[in-house]
Image (cartoon, rainbow, N blue to C red):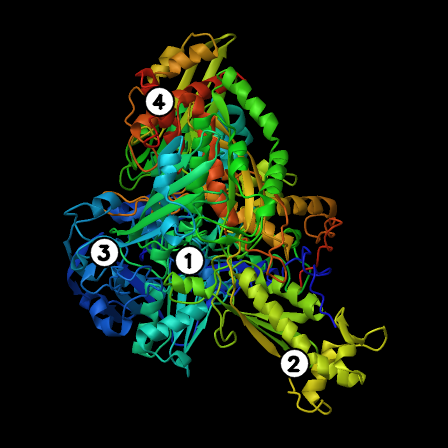
Amino acid sequence: MTVTDDRPAAEVGSARRRKEDARLITGRTNWTENLTLPGMLHLAILRSPVAHARIASIDVAPALREAGVVAVFTGRDIADAQGSLPCAWPVTADIVHPDHPALAVEEVRHAGEAVAVVVARDRASALDALAAIEVDYDPLPVVLDMEAALAEGADLVHADKGTNASYTWIYDSAQAGSGGSVEQARADAEVVIRRRYRQQRLIPAFMEPRSVVVDPTGDQVTVWSATQIPHILRFLLAVITGTPEHKVRVIAPDVGGGFGGKLQVTAEEMIAFVIAQRLGRPVKYTESRSESLLSAHHGRDQIQDLELSAKRDGTVLGLHVKLLANMGAYLGIVTPGVPLLGAFMYNAIYKFAAYRFECTGVFTNTTLTDAYRGAGRPEATFAIERIMDELAVELGMDPIELRRRNWIGTGEFPFNTVAGLTYDSGNYEAATDKALALLGYDELRAEQARRRESHDPVQLGIGVSTYTEMCGLAPSRVLGALRYGAGGWEHASVRLLPTGKVEVVTGTSPHGQGHETAWSQIVADQLGVGFDDVEVLHGDTRTSVRGLDTYGSRSLAVGGIALVEACRKVVDKAKPIAAHMLECDVSDLEFTGGSFRVRGNPDGGRTLADCALAVFAAHDLPDGIEPSLDADATYDPVNFSFPHGTHLCAVEVDTDTGRVGIRSYVAVDDVGLVVNPLIVEGQVHGGVAQGIGQALYEEAVYDADGNLVTGTLVDYLVPSAADLPNLVTDRTETAAPGHPLGVKGVGEAGAIAATPAVVNAIVDALRPYGVNDVPMPCTPERIWRAIRDAGAAGAAGSGEAQEGGEQS
Amino acid sequence: MTRISVTVDGVRYDDDVEPRTLLVYYLRERLGKVGTVVGCDTSNCGACTVLMAGPDSSPVAVKSCNVLAVQADRHQITTIEGLSDHGGPQHPLQQAFHDRHALQCGFCTPGMILASVDLLAENPDPTDEEIRTGLEGNLCRCTGYQNIVRAVHDAAAAMRANGATVPAARPAADASQPAAEEVPA
Amino acid sequence: MIPAWFDYANPSTVDEAVSALAEGGEDAKALAGGQSLIPLLRLRMAAPALLVDLGSIDELRGVREEDDDIVIGAMTTHAALLADPLVRAYAPVLVDAVATVADRQVRHRGTFGGSLSHADPAGDMPAAAVAADATLEVAGPSGRRSVAAADFFVDYLTTALQPGELLVAVRVPKRPGWGSEYLKFNRVAQAWAMVGVAATVRRDNGTIAEARVALTNMGPTPVRALAVEQALSGVPATRDAITAAAAQAGEGTRPSSDVSASAEYRLHLAGVLTGRAVAAAAGLTD
C-alpha cells in the first residue's frame, strides 16, 4: 500500500486562507496582556538611567508608603532565587561569560537595566510609586566603542573579568580541511579588495509589547508569556531557579510577532517568576514601548572587515572576514552564537577556494544583542553581496555577470562549501533570470545611462542580492559541535478522536506564521481528512509536551517532517485494524484519498475515522493490537535547509537632497516546494520590509553617555506602508531533497536578501560621483554627504573614492 | 473621579473614571474590550485605533491611547468587536483582510482595519498610493503592507458594488486558488 | 505608559477656562486635541496638576468669514481645517501644511490652536501661520488681545501666552490669487519635519510681486525667511531666479543638530526646499 508521498495534490500547495484569522480580525485574540486573575498584582520596573554605575544604595521605604503598593523588591532581595539569566550558547571553551542577574544587585551595566520592582494592586499605582524609590548611583566609566573596548587599558564592562573580549572564534578552511588557505589565495590573486562595513544596531520592534503573567497558586507554577520559546523557557526557568521542571507550566498564548526578539529568557520573566512565588499571588508585567526599545534585546551591531582575492577574469579565490560583534553588556540566550550562524555564509553562493573567518565578541555598556530575523545571515549576506559589487566595479564587469561566473551551478548540488556545509539544492540561474525579466533589467540600465549622460539630478541605481541561507535549525550534532546548549529536533503528535476529528500537537510555537493552517493542510493530505477536521494545538507545555519552539526558519523545515512522520505512523497503526475490518491481508491494502481499500476493489473502503471509532470501542481488534491510532514523532534534521533567491532593487536618488525612493523591488525566492503560497509570500513581504528598514530607516543610536537616543517610535523608524514600495514577488521551486514535502524554510529569507539589494542600488546610483559606500541606514543626509565628500576628494585630485574605508 | 457616559459598540456605559485614564485602558480594562490593544506610548503605531463619533460629528478614526476617557464622554466608540456581529457576516474589510492574507500575528490588525474603514469612508476609491498614505499612522511589522494594500482595494471595490454596510460578495477568486472562504464565526 | 494623576476641569465657556487656568497657575495646562500633550503625559515628561479641557467650549470651534479675513476657532481640528472650503479658498498654505501633519487619526483630534500653542519647533502649523500673516486672538484674565504670528512664537515650546491665557482664534487675511506650497522633508511619512518650508507667492504676470516664506525646524521657533522674501520681490518667476533667491534661506536661522539631522544638512535642505516650495507656489510645474 502507498501513502501518497510524491507531490500531494489537494491541500498542500493551495492558497488556503488561515484558520487563525477568525479570532484575529474580530478582536478575540488571547494576548498575554488580556489576562486577569483573581488577586493579581501588577509589576512596574525601575530601570537604570545610566549606562554604568555601582548601586551605592536603594531606599524603597518611600515607595512602600505609596497607595496601593504591596511590596518593593531590589536585586539583593531576590539574589539567590533569581540566579543568572542563561546563555545557552557558550561558543568557546574559554568564553568570558559574566553573571547576568535579572534584577541588578551591585552594579548596572546598561541603561535600562532593571534595578527595583514595585508590586501594587493596579498598574497605575505601581508606575506612580517608581518615582518614590531613591537610588544612589556611583558612576563608572562607560564603554561604547568596540575597538576602544579592545584596546590596551580600556575601561571594563565587567571589572572582574579583566577584559571586554568575550571570545574569539575562528573558522579556517585550510585548518578545517574544507578548502585552501587565504594567504595562498591572496598570493595567487590578481585583484585584492578590502572593505569595512558596519552592521548598525537594530531593534526587532515586534508590535506586541512583551508581557508575562505568573500564577504560583496552582499545582504547577503557570507562566503565560509573549514568548517564541515556551518549551525552552520552561526548561531554563526550572534549571536556573531550582523550581522542579514538572512543577512549571509555560503557556505562549497568542503572541504578536517575535522576529527573534522574543527568543529570550528575559529579566522580566525571571522577575515575575520569582516574585510571584515569593508573594504566593499571581503577578503581571507588561512593558511599555519605551521599555521595549530600551531593554528587549537588540540585533546586529557588527564591524566587518573583509578581504576578497580574485582573478582579473572575475573568478573569486579567497575570502577573509574579521568581525567585531557587539554583545552588549551581557550574554543573552544565544548572543555569542549569532555571528557564528553567519560565519558559514560569507562565502554565500560562490565557489571560493579558501575562506577564513575570525570573530571577537565584545562587551559594551549597551543592551545585550541577540537573535533578530536572520541572526548572523543578513550580516554575512550584506557583506559578501556588497563586496562582490565592489569587485564588479573594480573589474569593469556587470555585477550579475560576476555572480554567474562564480556561483554554484544547478547541476553541482549537493555542494560541499569552503565553509564546511553541504548545500542541498538550488537553481541560482533560474531565479536570477526570472528576477531580471520581472525587473526589466536591461531597460533600467538604459535609463540609468541616459540619466548619467544628461547629469540628471535624480539618478537611477540597480542593486542585486543573490543569496542562500542556512536555516531549518538544526542538526543536533552540528549544534553540539558548535557548543550550542540544546538540540535542533522537533516533535509532533497526531491523535485521532473517536468521531474522526484529528488533534495535532506541534512543538513549534507560531507567532504569526500560520502553523495552524499549514499543519492542517499537511495532515489533511497525509490522513485524507478534511482541512477543517484538524485542530492544531501549540504553545502550552501541558499540551505540547516536547518541542524546541519557533525561530531560525525551522518550523516547517523540521517540525513539518516530524508531523509527516507522525501521520505516517498513524496510517501504519491503522493498517492492521482496517485489514481486520475488511477481512483481508495487510499486504492487500492501499491507502489513497483517506481510505484503506483492498487493491483492485474500489468499493467498501475504511477511513481513518472508521478505524478511530473501532479502536475507541475496541470490541473487535486483532490480537495484540494496541487500541490507539495516536502517534508521535521526533525528528532531528540531518542538514540545514538552504533556500535561495535573487532580489533586485531599482532606486532613484535625488542628489540635491539625498532622498532615496525605491522605484521597483523584485524578489524571486526558491524555498523549495510550498505548503501554502500565501503564507510563503507573506513571509517574504515581511522579511523584505525589515531588510529595507535596515537599509534606509532603522538604527538604535546611543549617545556618548550610553543613553539610547532612539527610545521611542518617534526616533526608531519602523516603516509604514507609505515608506515601503510595492513588492513584486515570485518563486522558483527546487525541491529540498530529504524533506518529504520538499520544502525549505522561508521566515528569514526576505530580511537576509533585501538589505544589500537596496544598498547596492544606492551605491550603484552614486558611482559616477565617486562614491563606493554609504553607511547604513542610508539616510538622505548620509547620501548627500557621500556625494559631497567624494566630490571634494575628487576636486582635491586624489581621483579615488574616499568613502567606505580602504580600497585595494 | 469624573462621571462619563460613553456608548461603545452600541451599548451605553456610565462610569466613574480617573481623568488620567486613557480611552484605550478604559475600553480594555473597564469594559473588557480587549480587541483594542496598546502598541506604543507615543501614538505612532496606531494599534489602538477605534472609531469615535461625537454628539454632532460622524465617526472618525482616532488613536485611543491618545484620547482621555473623559474626552469620550457623550461620544460613541466603535471597536473591532463592534464592526460586525459575533457569528454574523464579516465587514467587507475583515473579509478582505482574511482573503488577502493581510495579517500574520494580528496585533496591528484591529487598528489597521478600523483605520481602513475610516479611509474608505472618506475616499471610497483610493489608489495604492492613497491607501499607503492613508495608513501611514498604522505600523505593521509582519506583513510588509503588501497584502494590506491589496485587501483595502478589494474591500473598497466590494463596498462600492454593494453599499457600505452590506457584507461584500466574495471577491473574484484566482482560478489557481481555492475560492475565498467565509470566515468561520 | 500612564500619566501621573491630574485634576480635571471641563468648562463650557472661554471665561470659565481662563479662570480655571489662572487659578491653576503654572501647574495647569490647557487640553486641546491632546495629540501633543497626551504622549508627554504618558512618558511623564509633563505632569500638570490640573488639565483644563477646552473640548466643550463652542466658541472655540468653527471657521467664519469676517470682511477681509477668515477667522479659525482654536479648537478646529486639523481634519476640519483640511476640509474647510474657506481655508482652501483664502489661506491655502494652511491646507498645504495641515495635510502633512502626522496621520489621519491624529488629524482627527489634533487642533490648529493646540499645535500653535504647543509651539514645537518641528511642528508644521506655526510656520504656516507665519507665512499666512496670521494674527492670534488670545483671551486671558485681563481680557482679550491680538498677537501677530511672528511675535507669538517666542522660544522652544514657549509662546507669548501668559499664565491663564489661552488661544481663542486665528485670524488670517484673505489672499485670493496667491499661490502656496508647504514642503515637509522627513525620514518617514509620519515623522516630524526635519525641515519644512511654507511659501505663499503673489505673481504679477511673469514676475513675483511678493512672497512669504517661513521655515519649520530651523530654530527654536518658526523662522520667517525675510532675506528670501526680499530677494524674490520683483524677480522673474523662473527656476533660476527662484533658486538664486532661495540660497539665502539659511539667513537668520539657528538649526540644531540632533538624531534626525545635522545643522549643516538642515541648512542645505532649507535652501533646496525653499527653492522648490517657492517655485511650486509660483505655479511652476516641471
Locate the C terminus of chain B and report the quarter of the image it occupies.
bottom right
Residue at 50% across / 49% down in the picture?
A: B140
Q: Mark 2 touching mark 4, by CB under 8 A?
A: no
Marks 1 and 3 sit apart, C-alpha to C-alpha, by 23 Å
Amino acid at dot 3:
Arg
Instruction: Name the residue type under label 4.
Output: Glu
Cβ–Cβ below 8 Å for labels 2 and 3?
Answer: no
Q: Nearer the viewer, residue C146 or A412?
A: A412
* Residue A464 vertical position relative to residue C135 in the rendered view, above or below: below
Image vertical order of residue C61 relative to residue A34, above or below: above
- Is residue C2 shown to the viewer in this render? no
Work out whether residue A310 or residue C178 is closer to the camera in this orientation and state it: A310
Structural crowding at the residue carrying mark 2, measured as other residues with C-alpha within 10 Å and reported as few (<14), some (14–19) or many (≥20) = many
Which label's residue is closer to the chain start, 1 or 3? 3
Q: Secondary structure at mark 1?
A: loop
- Where in the figure is residue A16, as x and y percent of width and height? 67, 58
Residue A209 numbered mark, or none? 1
* Coordinates of residue A636 in the picture (x, y in percent): 51, 67
Q: Residues within 10 Å of mark 4 (few under 14, many from 20)?
A: some
Single out the mark in the foreground, 1 or 2: 2
Asked if marks 1 and 4 touch (Cβ < 8 Å), the reply is no
- Residue under numbered circle 2: A629
Q: Is residue A222 visible?
A: yes
Numbered disc in front, either 3 or 4: 4
Q: Secondary structure at mark 4?
A: loop
